[in-house]
Amino acid sequence: MDLKSQKVKLNDGHFIPVLGFGTAAPEEVSKSEALEVTKFAIEVGFRHLDCAHVYRNEEQVGQAIRSKIADGTVKREDIFYTSKLWCTFFRPDLVQPALEKSLKDLQLDYVDLYLIHFPVAMKPGEELLPKDENGKMILDSVDLCRTWEALEKCKDAGLTKSIGVSNFNHKQLEKILNKPGLKYKPVCNQVECHPYLNQSKLLDFCKSHDIVLVAYSALGSQRIKGWVNLNHPVLLEDPVLCAIAKKHKQTPALVALRYQIQRGVVVLAKSYNRKRIKENIQVFDFELSPEDMKAIDGINRNIRYSEMLFGVGHPEYPFSEEY
């Protein structure tokens, strides 16, 4: 199946490829590796690249995109590129400059999708995780609706084709959807989503509002220290996933990715291993039966790997809600 044609229509008329390549990397991965691995992902067929200012590698990812355009592998319009507004830039006057900084790092004229990365505002400044002398995060209070209005202006200015959110719960989404004078609805909500946290309630909510759910940590998680709860079980060792994978002669990772695509979720596959990157593209080569899907639904345990504990205590910390 032609990977490039597998797309979902967003509520603003643009199209997003159902399979994306996640570029967030553990700290031990060098910047040059981010460049090489992104080039490789484009070479094997990935057209949807997910990045963010806070990943600190937009320069390299942009370089990879431009080099693959230069050698004729892709045109700019073949690539769907997502960037995200970090929590220290939520004040409305900081939003457009933050996106312009990403564009400058990328050396691109526009991004395809710009997201509010995490709904917890932090003290503006150079520090991505500003802390006080006791090591406690310095938070800020900004009305997310004002931040959203600044994103709408970025869309109008042509700096991004689409705008959305990430890590929002349904109440926070509702706040934006019910905002007086709303110009554009969020096209998507990018959240942690995998068979141990299948987000079925949030998915239903998003579908009912024509908002696409985008799944990160879809393979469990890379278990990055400091960001991830390392005590949780390893998703890809789950016996149900492994049995279904064996039956289809596929890997548990591919089964986890395929599961999302079949339930209408756009899925990000994150790997810095070339063999696995190539393998993840094969998600279109097989199909799960309704019984398989039901069995995978049954292993949900509401386990969240990325708890983003730095945001706890902020009134907008999203994960205190059930969904």
Image (cartoon, grey):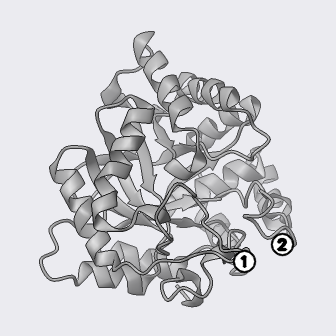
Query: 123 and 306: which one is in front?
Result: 123
Residue 301: image quadrant is bottom right
Residue at figure coordinates x 77%, y 61% from the top left: 241
Identify the disc placed on residue 104: none
Expressed as whole percent of the image width and height from the top left, the position of residue 79 reads 39, 33
Residue 161 screen position, x and y as percent? 25, 47
Kind of residue at badge 1: Ile
Q: What element carries label 1?
A: loop
Which residue is the site of mark 2? 232
Residue 295 visible? The answer is yes
**Viewer-proximal residue among 8 and 80:** 80
Image coords of residue 54 (percent x, y): 56, 52
Q: Determine whether, in the image, residue 85 is placed left or right of residue 275.
A: left
Residue 204 rendering spot, x and y as whole percentages? 43, 78
Q: Is mark 2 on a helix, strand or loop?
A: loop
Q: In which quarter of the image is residue 171?
A: bottom left
Establish if 291 lies above or below 46: below
Q: Residue furthest top?
A: 71
**How far is the residue under mark 2 from the one under mark 1?**
8 Å
Residue that badge 1 annotates: 303
Which residue sits at x=61%, y=63%?
129
**Which residue type carries mark 2?**
His
- The residue located at (73%, 61%) in the rendering is 220
Residue 269 versus residue 273 in the image, above or below: below
Instruction: Kindly indicate whether the residue at mark 1 contacts the one at mark 2 (C-beta within 8 angstroms).
Output: yes
Which numbered disc, 2 or 1, marks the residue that appears first in the sequence?
2
